[in-house]
Image: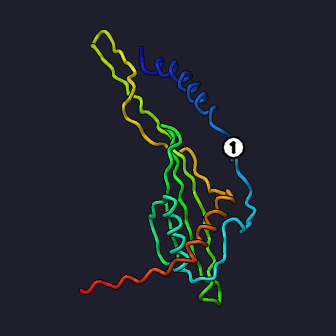
Amino acid sequence: MDFFVLSRRLLPLAASLLLAGCAGLASSPVPLGDYQLEAFNADTFVRHYVAPPARTCEAARRALLSQGYIVTDATADKVIARKYFQPRAEHHVQLEFRVVCARESGDADATVAFASGLKEQYVVRKVKESASLGVGGIGSLSLPVEGSLDSMVKVSSETVDDATLYQRFFELLGQYLDRSVAPEAVPAAAS
């Protein structure tokens, strides 16, 4: 069989496979499923305090530590902390809280505190492995083997908008603010 006859027979097959593969492509972007339009209502995420920003952020740091959060970053004007949950054996949830303490304009002893929570969910996925055995002239046999390797796959990431969670956090921050002091500056090491 010469090359041209073979290519004439395989060309329609290749074209039909290509068209079948392209038929499954979406013609438009997938719409966002559970998207909520932004209302830009600051009542949930903002509170005002009569204290300097450094003292307010120190109170936020202590409030988060008291609830089992791990502080990953803390400065005079921001605190970032995380807490991990595992509701089921193969389900992992991470809650990250960010608090930014900004000085109210014109008043060094007044602070506006902004808080936001980010919830990320992960599930465990098992990696499937296969083993194959091939013998020349006879063929090969491929058997799926349950993989022992697990990996965490992120399945969602969303801003927490539970107003009662923020209400409880800001109340606890206020309690720590009443008894906290501003963190002292760490002196630079002598060279």
Residue type for callout 1: Ser
Give the residue at mark 1.
28
Q: Residue at x 63, y 82 (%)?
A: 50
Where is residue 69 drawn, in percent x and y?
49, 59
In the image, 111 versus 32, the foreground residue is 111
In the image, 35 versus 178, the foreground residue is 178
Give the vertical position of 75 relative to 31 (above or below): below
Give the vertical position of 60 relative to 165 (above or below): below
Where is residue 166 drawn, in percent x and y?
64, 62
Where is residue 169 drawn, in percent x and y?
61, 64
Indicate left or right for 116 with 139 as reference: right
Give the vertical position of 124 relative to 75 (above or below): above
Count up the numbered dots.
1
Q: Residue at x 58, y 77 (%)?
A: 178
Q: Secondary structure at mark 1?
A: loop
User: Where on the picture, by quarter, is residue 46?
Assistant: bottom right
Q: Which residue sits furthest left?
A: 191
Where is residue 186 drawn, in percent x and y?
37, 82
